Image (cartoon, rainbow, N blue to C red):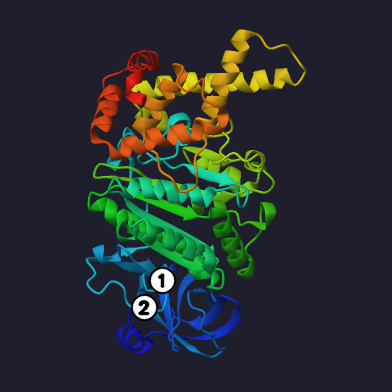
Amino acid sequence: MRDYKYYLDKLGEIGYVERVIHSIVYASGLPGVVSSEVVVFEGGSFGIVLSLNREDVEILLLNANPIRVGEAVARCGLHLAVPLSSELLGKVVTPLVMGLDGEVVVTKPEENRAVDSEPMSILGRTEVKKPFETGVKIIDLMIPLGSGQRELVVGDRKTGKTLFLMQAMLAQAMQGTICIYAAIGKRREELEGVISFMEKNKILGNSVVVATGSADPAGLIYLTPYSAMTIAEYFRDKGKDTLIIMDDMTAHASYYRQITLLARRFPGRSSYPGDIFYIHAKLMERAGSFEKASITALPVAESAMGDLSGYIQTNLMAMTDGHIFFDIDRYNRGIRPAINPFLSVTRVGMQAQSPLVRDLNRQLGSFLVHMEEIRDFMHFGAEVSESLKRTLNLGIRLDEFLLQPHLSVVPVNISIFLLAAIWGGFAKEIAKEKLQEEYNKIFQRYTEVAQFKQTVDSLILGTPSFAELVAKVTKTQGLLA
């Protein structure tokens, strides 16, 4: 972007600030201005035109610099666009694609792309048919995702949502996926924690962080997920699969509500504007599976006291392909990750899985539901038969198997293999306290011993059903010795 004098000389249209209400400015003049056009103030600040009327122009500020009544403002003659190139990889930028300290990040832009673009038409889209691994066992086996899926991550504050997102980023970056993390109005400590994780695990070079802090102008915070999606579309068009995380969309909705209330828009439910569903749905539609590559979206929503019926939460559920629910009750019981598989949904992820994973998913889900019923029944002090003892023993081993330490990533093939071994009777004589240690030995062996990894992978690849896999693994128990 150039300065005020350049645009004034170029277009010759000038206006003057009449009123300032926090991040909303009203200016007279500018007869040729259009909606969503960028304007520049004499003091160097930028803004976007929100609406027009006969008397004045309504402008949303994108800078924190103070604006004075009477200050001159000039048209730029263009809509908001950001410079894009591969230089962005490894960088932490603002929604205007500048460094956090104001330095220029993209020195040789390959293109300038509009931030608020239309979603691709259905003709350019393809079916979701490639699995998306998160490295989290309970997700990959019970709520599997596909590349190009839009999956909402919802749960109370401090229930492990961000930790799961970092696990997913790590698992995908290891496979070469470009990771875009949109930090929407985050506190500095939270942002530093994510960046530190990326640097420690050496995935920042394959990622872009688009960040705004809670002290930034509401207009800039509002643009954060749109700018991040624009960057994701740039890498998609270069043929690279992309993961975009929007953390979090409830905060985004709150800042948009703040903007619209200041602009005196008519409030709807919970004082949100009438177009809140539209602006979020349009953003989500920009993700998906496309001919060149895919954009997998993981928007985040924060719930209160485990309530999933909030306005923004239900809106996001309606416009995504499922949701992963982080349950505060499970978190308080010490279950990590605190994902409730019975209240989580994946709508298109199952079609991207192999017949083996689909079969496994059905059997594991049915068994865990049965286990919940047995535990409820046992509260009445019922006698335990031998068959019930065997079922409970398997349930204990599966519960321990599905537990996973924070920030650890488990490849899906070894998860399937070990689950089949447990189903076939592996570790039934081992005390509950030592199960995690035994499981971790096998996970470590898979990552360190190439021959074991090759054997497991070929076994999974050549087996179409879970029952057949259990039989094969049971016959080759020597593999686990």
**Res 259 seen here:** yes
Q: Quadrant of residue 384?
A: top right
Identified by mark 2, the residue type is Cys
Which residue is drawn at the image coordinates 64% and 41% (left, top)?
A: 308
Observer-nearest residue: 55 or 448?
Answer: 448
**Separation of marks 2 and 1 at Cα, in angstroms:** 7 Å
Observer-nearest residue: 253 or 192?
Answer: 192
Image location (x, y in percent) of residue 160 = 55, 48
* Residue at which label 2 appears: 76
Q: Earlier in the sequence, mark 2 or mark 1?
A: 1
Checking the image for residue 37, the label placed there is 1
Query: Pointer 2 and pointer 1: residues touching (CB < 8 Å)?
Result: yes
Image location (x, y in percent) of residue 399 = 55, 29
Q: Which image quarter is the N terminus in? A: bottom left
Which residue is drawn at the image coordinates 40% and 13% (left, top)?
A: 467
Element on which disc 1 rests: strand
Image location (x, y in percent) of residue 385 = 65, 8
Element on which disc 2 rests: strand
Identified by mark 1, the residue type is Glu
Observer-nearest residue: 478 or 42?
Answer: 478
Q: Against 72, is 58 above or below?
A: above
Q: Residues within 10 Å of mark 2 (few under 14, many from 20)?
A: many
Image location (x, y in percent) of residue 11 = 33, 83
Q: Against 299, is 94 above or below?
A: below
**Res 348 seen here:** no
